[in-house]
Image (cartoon, helix red, strand yellow):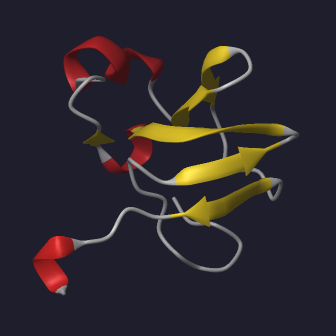
Amino acid sequence: MHYTSGQSVLPGDRVAADGLKGKVVAVIDDNLYAPDYPAAEWSYLGEGLIIETEEIGVLHLPTMGEDIVLIARLMDTAHG
């Protein structure tokens, strides 16, 4: 999955989505999961991404909408 900017969506990304703010905790399409959100518990959803929002808790979005915007990304210490 990718943002409209072309960047890949990754667990740990801080995002804004339809007026909500939160952190990406799983990208099901790419089999990427944060440690607290293991695939064994969330892959049954089949597709999309999971965002842990500040306002309403866990949100599953089956598709990547244009309204999902990357706010900040964790630094990748492996590459620099």
The quarter holding residue 44 reads top left
- The residue shown at (63%, 66%) is 3
Residue nearest the observer in this picture, 56 or 38: 56
The quarter holding residue 75 reads bottom left
> Viewed as shown, does residue 17 lie left or right of 23?
right
> Viewed as shown, does residue 11 lie left or right of 65?
left
Q: Is residue 49 above or below residue 39?
A: below
User: Residue 79: x, y in percent?
Assistant: 17, 84
Q: Residue furthest bottom?
A: 80
> Viewed as shown, does residue 57 lie left or right of 55?
left
User: Residue 38: x, y in percent?
Assistant: 23, 23
- The residue shown at (44%, 26%) is 46
Q: Quadrant of the C terminus?
A: bottom left
Q: How many marks?
A: 0
- The residue shown at (53%, 76%) is 7
Q: Residue furthest right?
A: 19
Residue nearest the observer in this picture, 58 or 60: 58
